[in-house]
Image: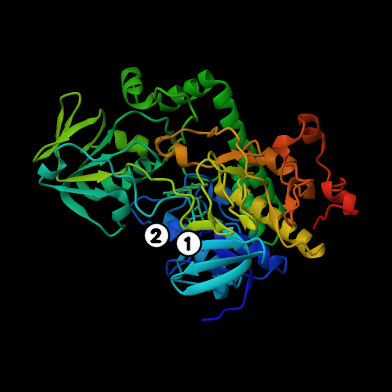
Amino acid sequence: MNRAREHVIIIGAGLAGICAARYMADNGIAYRILEKSGRVGGIWSALNWPGIRCDTEILNYSYSFRPLLSQHNLVPGAAIAEYLDSTADELGISDNIDFDTRVMSAAFSTREHCWRLQTSQGEFSADFIINTNGYFDDRPHVPEFPGQDAFAGEIKHLFDIDQKEDFNGKSLVLVGSGASAISAAPALYERCKSLTLLQRSPSYIYEDDNRIGWFSDRAQRLYRAGVHFPIRIVNAFQQVKSDLIFVSFRQFPALGKWFFRHHWRDCVDRDNYRKHFEPLYNPWEQRIPVAIGFKALLGKRGFQLVTSEISCFTNGGVRLNNGQHIKTDVCVLATGFNLEFFRFKITVDGESIDTRGINFYKGMMMGGIPNYFQPFGPPHTSFTRRIETISGLIVKIIRHMQKHQLQQVSIARKTVPRRPRITPNYVLRNLTNLPAFYGTLELPSIDKLLFFHFRAKHYQFDGDDSNALDEAQQSPAVRAGDTSDQVLTGNCERGEREVTI
Ligand SMILES: Cc1cc2nc3c(=O)[nH]c(=O)nc-3n(C[C@H](O)[C@H](O)[C@H](O)COP(=O)(O)OP(=O)(O)OC[C@H]3O[C@@H](n4cnc5c(N)ncnc54)[C@H](O)[C@@H]3O)c2cc1C
C-alpha cells in the first residue's frame, strides 16, 4: 500500500506515546501513532498481576493536562490503563493510532531527510520519529535454578499471572525483593493458603498509608470546581520533595539508613531489621519499593519473610543456602525485567546504528540518529514529569525547523561516561547495552528550569555541525548562567533568534 508521508510518527501508545501525541496535537503538528498491540496503555494494559500499581504519587504520575484525581496516593495498574485509554479517547488521539502495527525496522535517508519504517502492516514514511517503545523487554528476566525440572509444583513469573488467578488452598513462595514483589505480596496472600516472601537480599522499603494529604484533597476539590493552579502547587511540591529525598539520601547515606531504621521500628525488632530490611547498598542506589499493607502482613498467620538464596529446587519445594527447606505448591518469580531500549533495528543511510553505549542527550535524542527523539523519564521519580517536559522541547525543535525551513536535526555521536544514577540488578545486568545519559542533573524540578530551554546551538541542523555544541561541551559558567529563552543562538550567524512558544 502506498501511504502518504507522515510528518511525525510516534512508536507506541503507552504513557509516553499518548503524552507526545497530545503535545503534537496541541501545537498543530500532524502525527500518527503505530502501536504493536491492540490497546492503549503500554505496560499498564499489558501487565495485570495481583497488586500491580504505581509507586509514585498518582497526581505526579498522571499528566499535568489531565490529572487523575483520587483519594489514594498510589492507584492500581488497571486504573492507570483505563486513565490512559480515556485520555486518548477524550483528546481525539485514539483516531490517530494504527493498532496491531509492529515496527520492525526504521531507516533514515539523509538525502531525502526521511524515515522509512517497515512494519507488520507494510511501509510507513515520516519526517520525524518519536520512539516511545518503552524500555522493558517483552519477556521478564527468568533465572535458571538447579533442580527446577524436578519440582512437582508450578513455577510462574508474575508477568504471566493475572488478577483472576486464584491459588486457593495452595502454598506459595514469591521470589523477589523489588517493587513488583512488594506490591504483589499482600494481594497474593489474599489468594492462597500460605505465602513465603523469599528475598535473596533485603531492600529498603517504604510503607505508605496510601492516603492523600489535606492540601492535596483541597486542591482536587478546587480542580473539580474549575480552579486548576493548586494542583500545580501539589505537583511542584511532590516533585521537589522526591528530588530532595533522592539527593539527600545519596549525599548522606547515614541519614537515609537512620530514616529506614526509624520507619520500621514499630513492627520489626533490631535483629530482624538487620536480617530482612537492611541492604548492603546505600539508600537510593536502587529504586525504593513502596509498600501498602506490608507492615500488617508481617504479623499475619501463614505469612513469612525469609532472606536467603535458593540453592536448588526439590520435588516438594525449595532448598535455601542457609539449609532451610520451604515446602510449596507454586513458586512465583518476581525476578524483574530485562532492559530493551530499541525494539527494532535502526539504520542511517544504510548503516546499522550500534546503540550500545550511545550518547543519550537529556533523555531525548541519541547521537548520530537524525530526526529521532526518544523521551525517557528519570529513574528515581515520576516518569511523566520529564516526558512532558521533553515533549514540549520536541515541539520547540520541530517548530524552529518549520519556521526556518530546516529538514534535519541531530546531535553528534560521541563517547560520554556511562554513569547510571541508580544501579538495581536490571541495570547492572544490562550495563553494556545501556545508553549513556547526559545533559541534565536527572532531577526534574531543577532540570526543567535549567536544561530544557530550546537553544538552536545545542543541535546540528541540516547536517551542518559547525555550530552545534551541546551542553556537555560548554563551560559550566555558560551553562549555569545561560537560562534565558531570548539568548542569541549558535545560528545567530544566520541572523536567527531563539523561538519560544
Ligand atoms: C510494574 C511497573 C510499575 C511501574 N511503576 C512506575 C511508577 O510508579 N512511576 C514511574 O514513574 N514509573 C513506573 N514504571 C515505569 C513505567 O515503565 C513508566 O512509568 C511508563 O509507563 C513507561 O511508558 P512508555 O510509554 O515509555 O512505555 P510502555 O508503557 O512500555 O509502552 C510502550 C508501548 O510501545 C509499544 N511498542 C513496543 N515496541 C513496539 C514496536 N516495535 N512497534 C510498535 N509498538 C511498539 C508497546 O506495545 C507499548 O504499548 C513502572 C513500570 C512497571 C513495569
Residue 41 numbered mark, or none: 1
Quadrant holding the C terminus: bottom right
Residue 3, x across and y down, in percent: 57, 79
* Residue at numbered disc 2: 46
Q: Indicate the amino acid at tag 1.
A: Gly
Q: Could you tell whether 100 is left or right of 190 in the image? A: right
- Residue 492: x and y, percent? 88, 49
- The reply to whether the residue tagged 1 has its Cβ within 8 angstroms of ligand 1 is yes
Query: Is residue 299 visible to the viewer in this orientation of the structure?
Result: no
The quadrant holding residue 428 is top left
Q: Return the x and y of residue 179 as percentages of the image width and height.
A: 40, 41
Judging depth in this view, the residue of 130 and 209 nearest the camera is 130
Kindly identify the residue that appears in the image at 27 percent across and 41 percent down: 143
Q: Nearer the viewer, residue 483 or 381?
A: 483
Q: Which residue lies furthest to the bottom in this view?
A: 1
Between discs 1 and 2, the one toward the N terminus: 1
How crowded pointer 2 is (Cα within 10 Å; few <14, some 14-19, many 20+) is rated as: some
Residue type at mark 2: give it: Ala
- Residue found 58% across the figure and 32% down from its top: 417
Q: Residues within 10 Å of mark 1 (few under 14, many from 20)?
A: many
Q: Which of 227 and 271 is in front in this view?
A: 271
Image point (88%, 54%), residue name: 496
Residue 500 is tagged as: none
Q: Is the shortest distance between ligand 1 and the CB of mark 2 under 8 Å?
A: yes
Measuring from the top left, give residue 46's x and y in whole percent: 39, 59
Query: Is 323 located above or below residue 486 in the figure?
Result: above
- Distance between the Cα atoms at labels 1 and 2? 8 Å
Note whether residue 233 is visible. Answer: yes
Query: Against 314, is 13 above or below?
Result: below
Asked if disc 1 and disc 2 are in contact, CB closer than 8 Å, the reply is yes
